[in-house]
Image (spheres, grey):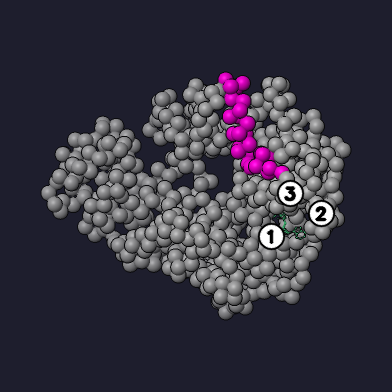
Amino acid sequence: RPSLRIDYAALLNEEQLRAVEAGEGPVLVIAGAGSGKTRTLTFRVARQLERGVPPEGILLLTFTNKAAREMTRRVEELAGASVDVRRMLGGTFHHAAHVLLRQYAAVLGFSTNFTVLDREDARDLMVTCIAERRLKSDKRFPRPDLVLDLVSLAANLQEPVSHVLMDRRPQLLPLAPEVLAAAARYQQRKAQMHLMDFDDLLVHLKRLLTHHPDVRQAITERFQCVLVDEYQDTNRLQGDLVDLLAGERKDLTVVGDDCQSIYSFRGADFSNIIGFPQRYPGCSVHSLTRNYRSTPEILRLANTSIALNTNQFPKVLTAARPAGVKPLLVPTLDAAGQATFVAERVLALREQGMSLEAMAVLYRAHSHSLELQLELTRRGIPFRVRSGVRFFEQSHIKDVLAHLRVVNNPGDELAFKRVIRRVPGVGPATAEHLWTALRALPEGTPLAEGLAHADVQAHLPRKSRKGFQAFADLMGRLTGPGASNAPERLIDGVLAGGYAEFLKAEFSEEEHREEDVRQLAEFARRFEDVARFLSEIALVAEFAAGEALGEEASGAVLTLSTVHQAKGLEWRAVFVLWLADGRFPLSLATRLPEEEEEERRLFYVALTRARDALALVYPLSVLPRDGERILLRPSRFLLELPGGEEAPFDRHAPSALEAEAGVVMGRDGPPPGGTDPAD
Ligand code: ATP
Ligand code: MG
């Protein structure tokens, strides 16, 4: 038994200490942001080790694998060398399931080297399933990603695909038989080929624990303690897994905040956390009421906002830190002004000695970071994009840019091959033949003419004729006489020429791909011609490549992230962007009252990431193509806050700008003007 000599009382407050010292579980900690839930969980791990639980007896489930690594590192710091923390199992549900299934796959009839499909692989398989069943009618349905989402949601909700289709995706009803057939085929093929997609990892682990008592016994005997962070975002399947893993012993500790439940679109359900005391009668319930993260000013803003949600567990949260400065409300003329403001502020803070690592910029949707990525690049401010791929590295953005590159330079082989492969039935080999045939034509043959040439068309498989003709027509329009050289018009042309349809067919609405492309067009407006636009973009790509090669690895970088990806993290200075109605809350996501509450929880998560400084930025207008400036309405999450003396924020420029736009913030002001094109 290791003696850890940790001075718990010096490092934790009384409430936290009680939760750490609570006997064997079940233990529930339900508390607001920044109150030390993650810290408490970390110390509880150390405490369990101290009580004599061997490290391999600990299962720690977290929102990201990185979070688990950080907590493990902290436990190691606390516990010292007397414990081999690497023997603990920590990480996401998927990670833990993967580790366990590698060990027990044979029990389920899988070989232990079963393959895990990533999202791309899964998509390819779905495409095959749709093709095999000859489901691909003229309607180009069903859409592979839509069917995958549906299958995934059903797995996570533990419901039949047909029910989920009816309840959650009614727009698919006209296609229900085709969609269900494709889904069934997909499940069948995976089983035949010993493949698991991400959801299967959880589904099969549940099967293993439910139907194989001997294995369940072995696993629950191994994991003497199960601890779960961010429990409010578990879905039904994950909730069931936690219950099964906790076994008879039920030495289970879960921590979370119902006000930070932001993944309902993936089936997360905060009734897991609210209903915990009913499922575990006699559990000890703890609340933590002191926020150690943020200044009282930041906390007041966050508390005032979230109090407007009706559906929540009552909580108290007061600031432990001394007074700081009020959050700043920053109207800017437009998106470009917003990017300039952030970049300048970031540089000023760095000048004052704050590291870039201590700052973050958060936004509702990935596409909202576009202008900023450009601005930061121009100024040489290094940044990392947490929310997945950088804007310009996304496949649909690359597709659109590839079209523009072909228009700009028909000799751009890579771009040509990329766009031609979007034609149904054209694979790498055909693309190669088409390219070679085009090159063999006399120098200077216009692209449209080349595409129509018999020598080129000879290489087309019959099934690709129609798609190829559409592509040739599009290129004819984009490069022919009288065609515009303005990048935003070209982008519009690509969208109208079939690409929007392609996106609709291939991806779900939730992925906002078309919106991304429209955003790109809006950005492109400031460039006179396509060549300049493309070279500016190429610069960004180069910057990104430098970073990928590790050039930035040693230096500090600014973080850009969606709010969803920022869960559980904290920075000294936080900027929240695009606080305009339709953008945050996102118009797509506020059709129902409970969706508005979820968006407000998301806003709460964003605000509570800030420790010392918080800026809420919103563009007052957008410039649509060929149009007059359109006013945006500030986010309802800002307008609903008290104004005047009571306002929980300071205005950046009490502003001529705002007055000009006819907007006064706070619910005491006159009604907001402006119409939002995103509504
Ligand atoms: P979130 O809801 O965002 O996940 P949380 O409740 O998990 O937040 P933590 O991340 O654990 O909160 O803690 C927030 C910050 O407050 C961290 O920097 C943490 O180190 C600090 N903190 C928490 N409790 C204490 C304490 N008793 N003494 C000093 N600092 C503390
Ligand atoms: Mg936390």
Q: Considering depth in this image, is 385 or 622 the residue closer to the camera?
A: 385
Identify the mark nearer the N-term, 1 or 2: 2
The 10 Å Cα crowd at callout 2, few under 14, some 14 to 19, many 20 or more, is some
Q: Which residues are magenta?
A: 83-109
Residue drawn at x 38%, y 51% as measured from the top left: 398
- Residue identifier under label 3: 79
Q: Considering depth in this image, is 644 or 535 the residue closer to the camera?
A: 535
Left or right: residue 47 compared with residue 165: right
- Residue identifier under label 2: 8
Q: Of circles 1 and 2, which is in front?
A: 2
Magenta span has 565?
no
Would you say residue 106 is visible in this rendering? yes
Q: Kindly indicate the quadrant of the structure image that contains residue 326.
A: bottom right
Residue drawn at x 43%, y 34% as measured from the top left: 124
Residue 228, x across and y down, in percent? 71, 43
Residue 194, x across and y down, in percent? 51, 25
Report how far apart the C-alphas of labels 1 and 3 lie in the structure.
30 Å
Residue drawn at x 26%, y 49% as measured from the top left: 413
Left or right: residue 96 compared with residue 224: left
Q: Considering depth in this image, is 56 or 278 the residue closer to the camera?
A: 56
Label 1 SS = loop
The 10 Å Cα crowd at callout 1, few under 14, some 14 to 19, many 20 or more, is many
Magenta span has 107?
yes
Identify the mark nearer the N-term, 3 or 2: 2
Q: Is residue 188 above or below residue 35?
A: above
Residue placed farthest to the right in the image? 282
Q: Is mark 1 within 8 Å of ligand 1?
A: yes
- Residue identifier under label 1: 608
Q: Is residue 118 above or below residue 221?
A: below
Q: Of circles 1 and 3, which is in front?
A: 3
Would you say residue 159 is visible in this rendering? no
